[in-house]
């Protein structure tokens, strides 16, 4: 699997599936979740409602509706509470479960946002390391993963980890 770091807006990614950093209701929110719902259109909220929520560390797929991506894989990252509340394991699980769901729906190209590093407060450098480590060690049919950084600091961190 090839892993690329890209700076940009995940809603514009033409991959098979983009990953959403959602909350456990799956009914939308701010940040990347809000951007994905706005770009996909109101059908996404209806599709999410039918999923009945999602546990932290788990992932579930819907169609992408008006997005360039065919699918959205919604995952729920942990809220940062200092790092001793299972946050690293839960964040790792988000990356691994998203790849498993990608395999189930036959997605071969994926784009991830920096899960939990916005309002959920996960330290960006540690989150980037968990992302790269868990993607590298996964056994999956996914060919290419794009790590989408929304800020320069995250982009630089991904570049360092991948070089
Ligand atoms: N494309 C790529 N990355 C983005 C975009 C975008 N369009 N917009 C923001 N980011 P956050 P979380 C980055 O807060 O921390 C929502 O309300 C952002 O800079 O979106 O997992 C949900 O409903 C940051 O690096 O997600 C939940 O309630 C990263 O995406 C809660 O926020 C994640 O920031 C989830 O919090």
Image (tube, helix red, strand yellow):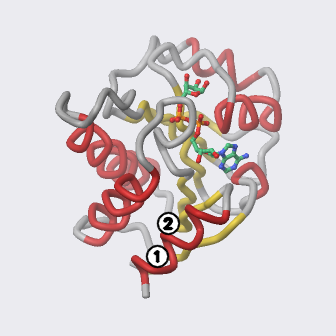
Measuring from the top left, give residue 25's x and y in whole percent.
Answer: 50, 13
Q: Residue at x 54, y 46 (%)?
A: 19
- The outermost residue toward the bottom is 163
Q: Residue at the location (43% across, 30% down)?
A: 76
What crowding class fits label 1: few (fewer than 14 Cα within 10 Å), some (14-19), or many (20 or more)?
some
Residue linked to disc 2: 108
Element on which disc 1 rests: strand
Q: Along the line of sight, which residue is nearer the eye, 108 or 59? A: 59
Where's ligand 1: which quadrant?
top right
Q: Give the labeled residue for mark 1.
A: 3
Other-residue count near label 2 (Cα within 10 Å), few / some / many at <14 / 14–19 / ≥20 = some
Where disc 2 sits, the SS reads: loop
Instruction: List x then y, in percent, for residue 40.
Output: 78, 35
Q: Which quadrant does the C terminus fall into?
A: bottom left
The relative height of residue 20 versus residue 23 in the rendered view (above or below) is: below
How far apart marks 1 and 2 lie (CA) works out to: 12 Å
Q: Does 53 sit above or below residue 39? A: above
Residue 162 lies, in percent from the top left, at 42, 81
- Residue 17: mark in rendering: none
């Amino acid at each position: 699997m090839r892993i690329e770091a890209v700076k940009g807006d995940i809603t514009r990614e033409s991959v098979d599936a983009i990953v959403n950093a959602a909350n456990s209701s799956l009914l939308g929110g701010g940040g990347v979740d809000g951007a994905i719902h706005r770009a996909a259109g109101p059908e996404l909220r209806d599709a999410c409602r039918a999923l009945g929520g999602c546990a932290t560390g788990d992932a579930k797929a819907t169609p992408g509706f008006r997005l360039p991506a065919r699918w959205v894989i919604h995952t729920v990252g942990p809220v940062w509470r200092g790092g001793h509340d299972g946050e690293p394991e839960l964040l790792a699980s988000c990356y691994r479960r998203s790849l498993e769901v990608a395999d189930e729906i036959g997605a071969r190209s994926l784009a991830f946002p920096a899960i939990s590093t916005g309002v959920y407060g996960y330290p960006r450098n540690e989150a980037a390391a968990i992302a790269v480590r868990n993607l590298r060690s996964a056994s999956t049919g996914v060919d290419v993963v794009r790590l989408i950084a929304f800020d320069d600091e995250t982009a630089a961190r991904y570049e360092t980890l991948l070089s």
